[in-house]
Amino acid sequence: MLFTGSSPSDAPMDSTSSVADPTKRAFLSRAATLATAVTLGGLTPPIAEAAQDYYSNYYSTVIRPPQPASALSSKIDNKIKYLRWNGKIAPNERTAWLIYDFTSRQYLTTINASTPYQSASMIKPFIALAFFYKVLEGRLYYTPYQRAKMEAMIQYSDNSATNYFIHLLNQTSRYNGPIEVERTLRHYHPGIFRHIRIVERIPRGGRSYRNKASALDYHRFLYALWYNQLPFSNELKRLMSLPNRDRVYTNADGVARETWVFDKTGTTARLCGDMGILVAQGRNGGRYPYTFIGIIEKSQPTKNYQAWKNNRGDVIREISSIAYQHLRQMYNLV
């Protein structure tokens, strides 16, 4: 089953293109309508419990133990071994990889996928989702000002904007902000967020080491997002498709420029990662979406942050290119 394009959105991540993709224009139009409707006092929310029931009926399709196909897993495993041998991945670094193909509905790779790793800024879409549930409950509102803050948090990974939303969640509960984020996510989606641990705001300097999630947590979130099983799914897709310097497409030479990307990166002196949905284009005109999660975690902070971040980001780009080339052979992608 190939994807032909109606419900998901968005656009190529090549921000230098001067021609807007028609599907991007249509998606942004829907998102703008949403943002206009959900302003201060302008939302009549359903009962929270009813929303929980509505969004919890499909999880059996995504929480079953993955059965990855062996071919791509072997390619990635051999590549990681080679990168360790030549020093591009250090002995004190561990990695996790997950690739899920929506077309065949198969996990193509799950390497250390159920192990919690530091989340860094990859936690930010989760914070956005918790906020949107508070909007759904009628406790908070999504105003134009907050929309701009949300864009800063997701597109530019602004830490002060992130702490702003954590503070808002704090105001809706007797629990502190980070704990309320986790409580909200687990309340509505216990099947998705099985390994998360959200315990801290983003500290000064961005040294966020204590929040955790697994590759499977990210994948289950992306799966629900793709099939519009989350509140404000189209808005979350819009936010995650805004142009940024990602690690799955930008400078990933093996990934075709026609690919659409919805993603969020995460970086600290101990963590380099990216999680997202890539939507490849087939030579038949169809679209072939898949999730890609890549995580590299270091046991101790690096002494050369910039070089380490760049080098490990390139490792993720290499694995992303391998995954795309594998799918290219499966589906005759461009």
Image (cartoon, helix red, strand yellow):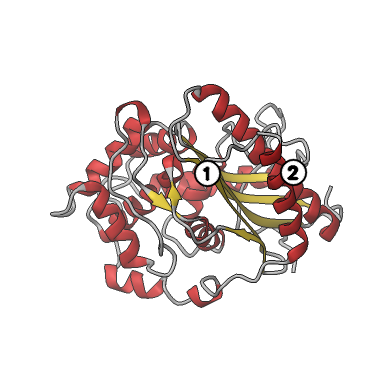
Mark-to-mark CA distance, 1 and 2 = 20 Å
Q: Amino acid at mark 2?
A: Ser
Q: Which mark is residue 321?
A: 2
Disc 1: CA contacts within 10 A as few (<14), some (14-19) or many (>=20): many
Q: Are marks 1 and 2 in contact (CB under 8 Å)?
A: no
- Answer with mark 1 or mark 2, whichever residue precedes in sequence: 1
Q: In the orientation shown, which residue stands out farthest toward the left?
A: 174
Q: Amino acid at mark 1?
A: Met
Which residue is located at x 80 percent, y 49 percent? 325
Q: Is residue 186 left or right of residue 295?
A: left
- The image shows residue 111, relative to residue 46, as above or below, that is above
Q: Position of residue 218 (x, y in %)?
A: 50, 55
Q: Residue 164 versus residue 149: which sits nearer the camera?
A: 164
Q: Position of residue 326 (x, y in %)?
A: 79, 54
- The image shows residue 166, relative to residue 175, as above or below, that is above
- The image shows residue 123, relative to residue 182, as above or below, that is above
Q: Residue 191 versus residue 210: which sits nearer the camera?
A: 210
Q: Is residue 155 left or right of residue 142?
A: right
Q: Nearer the viewer, mark 1 or mark 2?
A: 2
Task: Give the quarter of the figure containing the N terminus.
Answer: bottom right
Residue at the disc numbered 1: 240
Visible residue check, residue 183 = yes
Which residue is located at x 57 percent, y 48 percent? 95
Q: Position of residue 322 (x, y in %)?
A: 76, 47
Disc 2: CA contacts within 10 A as few (<14), some (14-19) or many (>=20): many
Element type where label 1 sits in the image: helix
Q: Is residue 275 left or right of residue 77?
A: left
Q: Position of residue 137 (x, y in %)?
A: 27, 60
Which residue is located at x 51 percent, y 72 percent? 63
